[in-house]
Image (cartoon, rainbow, N blue to C red):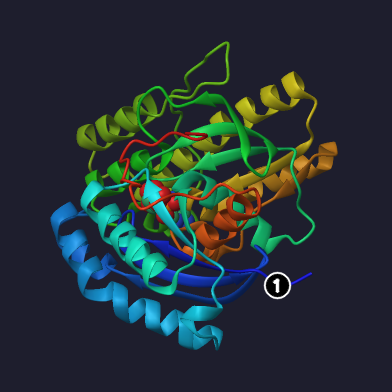
Amino acid sequence: MKDILTLGIESSCDETSVAVVKNGREVLSNVINTQIDIHTIYGGVVPEIASRNHIQNISFVSKKAIEDAKIKYQDVDAVCVTYGPGLVGALLVGLSYGKALSYAIEKPLVGVNHIEGHIAANYITHKDLKPPFLCMMMSGGNTQIVLVKDYNDFEVLGKTKDDAIGEAFDKVARVIGLGYPGGPKIDRMASLGKPTIDLPKPSFENLDFSFSGIKTAVINLYHKNPNLNKEDLCKSFEKTVSEILIENIKKAINNTGIKTIVLAGGVSANSYIRNSFEELEKDGIKVYMPDIKLCTDNAAMIASAGYYDFINNKTSDLSLNAIPNLKLSE
Ligand code: KG4
């Protein structure tokens, strides 16, 4: 069978990325231009600045992805682009570029849901991974348990009622003075601490989550006592958050009988969370997690998800628009 090359484009937040992937699993190139340094001085992503930088970078990043893959634009079989969820102005840059490229090279356009992209990052890391499985999706904008029935068939079993888990990491980091991006900074600080501080955990009958209570508890504790050991505070925060995730994933395993767990999204780079999930393997659960560099936003994951849409004839036309609050399976 002929190899299929998908070109992925990702610009939903502050990374401009273009990648080429073979048959959904093999990365030929994955160029990521991050704007972290630009937004750090503001303490978070400034949407208008992100859009402007995407405009400046997208053509260069795309050319580099083609060069690195050692192909020509004409060799690409489908142009796969994130159309949501994300920042509307940022999404529109990648989407407009993707539409123009698809039109120019006369190859199909595939609109990709960014959340599906995060899940697909695992198909690149683990060549043997196939649905069905349960996905613990943890990013800056999303926290949900997804039943992945097939490559294009998803059911959300539970989700956060308030903050996303990454948002909680970022807000805690900002308040205790670690700055942006918060997740990796908390991760590093926690590695030096002990989990000595009790923090509240929400309790739901179903598989939903809440992270605003623990976030507020950490912030209040710190405001009352700014001399609190930050390393211990970060470790206690990570431990409690991990327990919340593990308790719900165990319920999902019991409810569905599915014993394959896949982590996805930026927060799946967290070392404490990765270790906590690895512990489940002792109970006969198979746990997959993406390679660290594929946890956060990148276009290879979009090219992989787009491949599975493309081979299932899920292509888009040039009327495709950005949908900032796109849900899974829309
Ligand atoms: O998936 P992602 O790159 O963007 C979205 O699609 O939302 O996730 C970004 C989130 C941020 O909140 C960032 O702080 C968090 O992932 N993150 C981490 C770590 N690395 C990134 N959180 C905890 N520990 C990490 N090592």
Foreground residue among 170 and 100: 100
Foreground residue among 231 and 57: 57
Give the secondary structure at mark 1: loop
Percent position of residue 166, x then y: 40, 44
Foreground residue among 32 and 243: 32
Q: What is the residue that sits farthest to the top in this orientation?
A: 205
* Left or right position of 22 against 239: right
Q: What is the residue that sits farthest to the right in this orientation?
A: 284
Residue at point 44% right, 39% down?
237
Tell whether circle 1 marks a residue whose Cβ is less than 8 angstroms from ligand 1.
no
Name the amino acid type tagged 1: Asp
Residue at point 31% right, 45% down?
321
Percent position of residue 259, x then y: 79, 35
Percent position of residue 73, x then y: 47, 80
* Left or right position of 28 against 107: right
What residue is pinned by disc 1?
3
Is residue 4 in view from this perspective? yes
Vertical relation: 285 (above or below) 93:
above
Residue 35, quarter of the rendered image:
bottom left
Mark 1 Cα shell of 10 Å, populated few (<14), some (14-19), many (≥20): few
* Left or right position of 202 against 151: left
For the N terminus, the image quarter is bottom right
Foreground residue among 301 and 287: 301
Q: What is the residue that sits farthest to the front in this orientation?
A: 106
Vertical relation: 92 (above or below) 169:
below
Vertical relation: 299 (above or below) 82:
below
Residue at point 52% right, 56% down?
269
Is residue 178 in view from this perspective? no
Percent position of residue 168, x then y: 35, 38
Residue at point 85% right, 39% down?
284
Vertical relation: 282 (above or below) 295:
above
